Amino acid sequence: MSYRIRPASPDDVPALMALRTEAETWLRQRGSDQWSDPEIGGRAITKWRETIDDGRAWVISSDTGYVVGTVSRGPADQDFWRNDDQLQTAFYLYKLIISRRAAGDGLGSLVLDWACRIAALEGRPWLRIDCWRTNRDLQRYYEGLGFSHVRTEAPAHRKSGWLAQRRSNSILNEKRSLVIDCDTPTYIPTGRISGG
């Protein structure tokens, strides 16, 4: 199976909402409290549209055109990352969601490689993530894909805070990659990303 990645458009919001709902349900069935605050309604739609309008959200589709994932980029989350982390040295990845119908095909790894390649093109040595503090399975998943735990932050108003990073020159899938489906090779509006 091959996959394409392209900038998300406002028309993708229903598919993105469906991906998030599917992920929430799957996590709940596994006993995880991650995303236990369902993303529904007008506020959720507004958040997706803002991310899309800022050029920070992408959609991943299968070779049949079905939306099977999404990923977003953003500034360093100031609840977790500190100035002494040299914020500008990293690409900060958020909202990586893979549909259950694409689970087990290595799509998550391909998306992480894609983000590493962009970070490297921008001269950033790190790809950084934060994930739910209680989701040990997800933490092991990222560690298995080359991420090193940096530290865990626990602000009272957030449930995420397990911080990890991977070198941007660390590509795990040399013979397989996402097909970039947009006008420019990276489609990264770096001028809009603060902290970067």
Image (tube, rainbow, N blue to C red):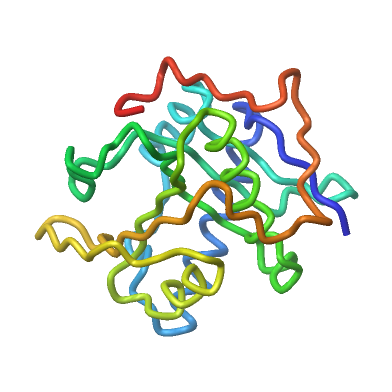
Question: Residue 157 location in percent, x, y?
Answer: 13, 55
Return the residue found at the far left.
156
Residue drawn at 56 percent across, 24 percent down: 188
In this picture, residue 54 sits left or right of residue 85: right
Q: How many marks?
A: 0
Question: Residue 5 location in percent, x, y?
Answer: 72, 40
Question: Residue 135 location in percent, x, y?
Answer: 37, 75
Q: Quadrant of the C terminus?
A: top left
Residue drawn at 44 percent across, 39 percent down: 91
Q: Quadrant of the N terminus?
A: bottom right
In the displayed structure, 71 sits above or below 187; it is: below
In this picture, residue 161 sits left or right of residue 171: left
Residue drawn at 22 percent across, 65 percent down: 152
Question: Residue 12 location in percent, x, y?
Answer: 64, 35
Q: Quadrant of residue 84?
A: top left
Q: Residue 191 versus residue 21: which sits nearer the camera?
A: 191
Q: Quadrant of residue 137?
A: bottom left
Residue drawn at 46 percent across, 64 percent down: 147
In the displayed structure, 108 sits above or below 79; it is: below
Return the residue found at the far top.
191
In the displayed structure, 37 sits above or below 32; it is: above
